Image (cartoon, rainbow, N blue to C red):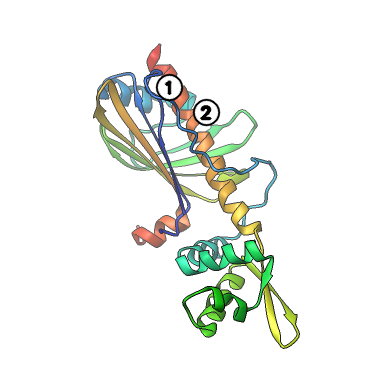
Amino acid sequence: MTDPGGARGNGGAQPRPTSRSGADGSEGRTAMPDDHVNAVFRALADPTRRTVLRLLADEGAATPTALARALPISRQAVSKHLGALAAAGLAECERAGRETRYRLNGAPLHEAVHWMAAIGSAWDRRLDALTALLDE
Amino acid sequence: MAAVRQTTRSCVLPAGRTRAWGVLTDPATASTWLGGTGSVALRVPGSHGVLTEPDGTLRQLVVERVEAEHRVVLRWWTDRGPGVEPSIVEIELDDARGGTSVTVTETALADHVATEGVR
């Protein structure tokens, strides 16, 4: 997950793009351990897993069987992807009769988006300051 | 999609490359634009600097690589907040219409090592 940010204005000749992520910028968040953060991004790197997350967000919760009906892959493949998402903390499971139901856990995504928003905003301020120094 | 925590910003600075590099790396101005007080020697590979940011956050940095008037690479980290995990910062200058383009890419160190190999 990268935030390309983009080009900023040049003395007003171009509008400044609003390319920041939508995190709320709240202070006092605890940094996730490295292994956990890396697991989140590895989980998100796969397009099928991103689709699974979207389906979970849309449905609230779903079983592997239900998800497989919406995807061009087998139930076993869905279960494998759900396992990777659960290992990264992006999905939580609960028993539903004889099957397991999964729900989305958005907290790890919020942390990642917060990182990019905070770092990106800081660089916007630094480049503003550098530009101002050169304008003097 | 690359699974990397990375943020990039760029703009065109209103100065030629020599002057832009000078202000960017001059110890007298570097800490100002980086947003803190302290001493940083961005032209000296291996140098260690410390900045105190307005909210009291301490930021430490090590200059990893310098290519005069073109690129400086830092490794830095803070004592609190989202920067507590070390990052690699690459600042690149290039000639551009109207001045000098500066592109900054900050990558979480754990993700940088994963993609670039151990350095």
Residue B95's x, y, as percent?
24, 28
Residue B38's x, y, as percent?
51, 28
Horizontal side, residue B77 vs residue B70: left or right: right
Residue A48 is at least partly visible in this image:
yes
Residue A7's x, y, as percent?
38, 33
The relative height of residue B114 versus residue B76 in the rendered view (above or below) is below
Q: Chain of mark 1?
A: B
The residue drawn where x is 34% and y is 36% is B44
The residue that disc 2 covers is B35
The residue that disc 1 covers is B29
The relative height of residue A37 versus residue A80 in the rendered view (above or below) is above
Q: What kind of residue is marked 2?
A: Gly
Give the residue furthest to the bottom.
A98
Label 2: state its secondary structure: loop
Q: Marks 2 and 1, how far apart in space?
A: 10 Å
Horizontal side, residue B16 vs residue B90: left or right: left
A66 and B85: which is toward the camera:
A66
Give the residue furthest to the top.
A136
The residue drawn where x is 41% and y is 29% is A8
Horizontal side, residue B11 vs residue A19: left or right: left
The residue drawn where x is 34% and y is 32% is B102
The relative height of residue B66 versus residue A85 in the rendered view (above or below) is above
Which label sits in the foreground, 2 or 1?
Answer: 2
Horizontal side, residue A89 vs residue B100: left or right: right
The residue carrying pointer 1 sits among few (fewer than 14), some (14 to 19) or many (20 or more) residues within 10 Å by Cα, namely some
Q: Chain of mark 2?
A: B
Residue B84's x, y, as percent?
57, 47
Residue A46 is at least partly visible in this image:
no
